[in-house]
Image (cartoon, rainbow, N blue to C red):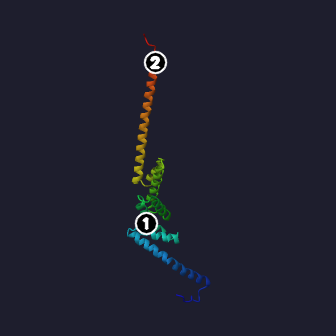
Amino acid sequence: VSAPPPREWDAERIARAIFDAYDRQRTAEVDALVEEGMTKSAAGDDAAAVAAFDKVLARMPFHPRRALMAPAYARRARALESTDRPAARAAFEKSLELDPNGAHAPEARAELAVMDGQDLEARGIEDREPFQRALSIDPANVAARAALDRLDARAHDSESRSRKWTWAAAFAAAFVVVLVLFARVPRRA
């Protein structure tokens, strides 16, 4: 409505009212997207919720309700883990960025640590630290426990093989020593 302001308003109050009106108009679409995302999230459609939230955050990165968006990103990341690791990683990171102290945060941090360890393994680097970090954050993390068990089994197998080769080398050396000693013993005619 374009009614003139009351006469008792000063210039500052008029300017504030104009800016507030423009702000409400500007944020109306963003607020509608937030509501759409919340509705989709509550219905279990995290893909649609995240799509709506992405639009919100592109326009207003520090939206006041951003922490409420984080669980949808964490659930979406969980759904993508086995099919699209880069997208899952990005969604876990986004959930932590939106709400670093939320209920989903420990799980997200643990999953990111597991992904770090798996990425190192894929490059041929066996590092227990990321998996141990994941378990310290989330003791129930099944993937971290399985990875540590797998690394322990490999280390045990490697140690066992190493021990076998050491014993084989020792026996071979002893055999050579015995042969040399017998070769030096004078033969009786």
Residue 27 location in percent, x, y? Answer: 51, 76
The vertical placement of 38 against 16, above or below, is above
Residue 115 location in percent, x, y? Answer: 46, 55
Q: CA distance from mark 1 to mark 2?
A: 80 Å
Residue nearest the viewer, comparing 182 with 107: 182
The vertical placement of 174 against 20, above or below, is above
Residue 157 location in percent, x, y? Answer: 41, 40
Q: Residue at x 44, y 28 (%)?
A: 172
Of circles 1 and 2, the one toward us is: 2
Residue 187 location in percent, x, y? Answer: 44, 13
| Label 2 SS | helix
Horizontal side of residue 58 vs 141, given as left or right? right
Query: Which mark identifies residue 72?
Result: 1
Visible in this render: residue 108?
yes
Location of the C terminus (image quadrant): top left
Please rate how many residues cluster around mark 2, counting C-alpha atoms within 10 Å: few if below 14, some from 14 to 19, many from 20.
few
Q: Amino acid at mark 1?
A: Ala
Q: Residue placed farthest to the right in the image? A: 11
Task: Looking at the image, tell me whether mark 1 or mark 2 is earlier in sequence order.
Answer: 1
Q: Residue placed farthest to the front in the image? A: 189
Q: Residue at x 45, y 71 (%)?
A: 52
Query: Which mark identifies residue 179?
Result: none
| Label 1 SS | helix
Kindly identify which residue carries mark 2: 183
Residue nearest the viewer, comparing 160 with 131: 160
